[in-house]
Amino acid sequence: MDRSERSKTIPIDERSATRLADTGLRYGLVDVADETTFDAWLQAVSRGFHGERDDAAALARTREALAERRITGVWDDTAPVPIDPVATVASWIGEITLSPGRTIESWAVSEVSVSPTHRRRGIARNLLEGELRTAAAAGLAAAMLTVSESTIYGRFGFGPATLGATYQVETARATWRGPVAPGRIDHVTPQDAAALLATLHDRARLQVPGDTNAYPALWARMTGAVGDPAKTAPIRSVRYASADAEVTGVAVYRLRANEHDFTKHTVEIEALVTVDDEAYAALWRYFLELDLVESVSVEVRAPGEPLRWMIGDFRAVTERVIDHEWLRVLDVPAVLGGRDYAASGRIVLDVADSLGFAAGTWLLVADEAGTGVVTRLDAVPHATPVLELDVAELGSLVLGTVTAETLVRAGRITPRAAGDAAVADRLFRPARTPWLSTWY
Ligand SMILES: CC(=O)SCCNC(=O)CCNC(=O)[C@H](O)C(C)(C)COP(=O)(O)OP(=O)(O)OC[C@H]1O[C@@H](n2cnc3c(N)ncnc32)[C@H](O)[C@@H]1OP(=O)(O)O
């Protein structure tokens, strides 16, 4: 059974179904083959996120894009249009990289919406707790999501695990000082760009803690290979090939004209996927040297990328950082045992989890090779560094996005002795800056 079938065959969480039924609501799965019900669900998602009402072509595309997911809804059978769900969730078994070359399966959650007519009466809580129980029962070690607001998911044990940077570059000030790549850049069709994004992203994501597998429809949409031609027309795609003709990078961008000044177009990079530093430098240089362009921007990049160090004027780049991917640890030994460590050592993590999944006292022992093994202890031992923390903070520490020292100083975690956070930080230092390269 493939991952999609595995996730779609999991029944609805009984505890949440009972609680919602007690308030007159029906919690169930959507059969994606039933187009009428699925379309009503898709329109409910669109309405929930203040989007447009989709036409038949857009619905058909989204049905195809989401058909691999487990689609869940809540219905109020007393509403005037009972087929429209009052709440939605989509979830699936995804894969997240914990260390370069090491991934685990994780429960991805998306499209969480509750109708404005039914908000703040506990529907989302039932849905989220139901998703976590579902994931744990299916043997998944973690759950993950990208969020509309950073205030919602901490209460369910999620912590921000990767940060996302937006870069804006004033091209006139950004004289190229980086490496000069020996290969070539060429325009490609939207279809070829979509195919390249799929294959190169599937390589690149394995190098970066926090990145996940993407769904193929994402790339087709991003490149304009599918979609409304009026909206996708200004999208262009280029690829980079090394001197020995290996394609190692692809970029998709959108041009916006300045109606008052033709020399001041702006470029928004929709995707920039590279499997090595040479392709990264080549494609950035391409963007910064475009004629008739005043600024280039890109969202959802890793904080502190080399870009700023590759141009003449440090201040040509503005970087804004927000939380991006949120991680919820369900199985502590599987998650912490699934990454590599930067040093050998031992630390005890005394984890509180109001939903129970990750609660316990856990001893992490990392050996010289960077392999970590976690065992449950009955009590906090003497003479071992200890951090007391909530599962949400564990979600933030796991990939190394934030240091334990920072969280101690923020009053978010408690070391037993001075120096215990430093022990954790020596172990958890990531091989690469954690980064999730897409939204899902
Ligand atoms: C992974 C994703 O899909 S992210 C997208 C999330 N969805 C959206 O932003 C769409 C617009 N918003 C919504 O649809 C809804 O307001 C939701 C889904 C955010 C919340 O749904 P509700 O059913 O109203 O939430 P519910 O009543 O279950 O509240 C659960 C808890 O979250 C809190 N909460 C709910 N919404 C928010 C919010 N926007 N910000 C902060 N806290 C919130 C509630 O106060 C409550 O707290 P408590 O139980 O700790 O006291």
Image: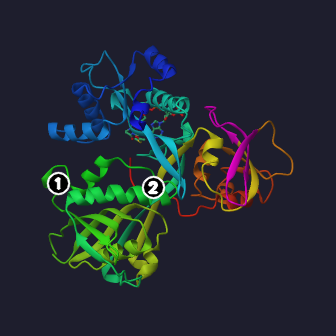
Dot 1 falls on a residue whose secondary structure is: helix
Residue 144 point in image, percent of width and height: 49, 43
Dot 2 falls on a residue whose secondary structure is: loop
- Which kind of residue does numbered mark 2 sit on? Leu
Q: Earlier in the sequence, mark 1 or mark 2?
A: 1
Image quadrant in which you'd find residue 237: bottom left
Question: Residue at coordinates 32% horizontally, 36% vertically from top-left?
Answer: 48
Residue 344 point in image, percent of width and height: 73, 59
Q: Is residue 432 magenta?
A: no
Res 436 label: 2
- Visible residue check, residue 53: no
Q: CA distance from mark 1 to mark 2?
A: 26 Å
Image quadrant in which you'd find residue 187: bottom left
Q: Is residue 130 left or right of residue 32?
A: right
**Mark 1: few/some/many CA within 10 Å (<14, 14-19, 20+):** few
The answer to whether 90 is drawn above or below residue 345 in the figure is: above
- Which kind of residue does numbered mark 1 sit on? Lys
Residue 64 point in image, percent of width and height: 25, 38
Please name which of the two marks, 1 or 2, marks the residue nearer to the observer: 2
**Farthest right residue in view:** 382
- Visible residue check, residue 434: yes
Q: Is residue 373 magenta?
A: yes
Q: Regarding ligand 1, which quadrant of the image does it lie in?
A: top left
**Farthest left residue in view:** 230
Stretch in magenta: 351-376
**Mark 2: few/some/many CA within 10 Å (<14, 14-19, 20+):** many
The answer to whether 279 is drawn above or below residue 21 in the figure is: below
Q: Quadrant of the N terminus?
A: top left
Q: Are marks 1 and 2 in contact (CB under 8 Å)?
A: no
Question: Residue at coordinates 64% horizontally, 32% vertically from top-left?
Answer: 356
Residue at the spot of label 1: 231
Residue 388 point in image, percent of width and height: 72, 46
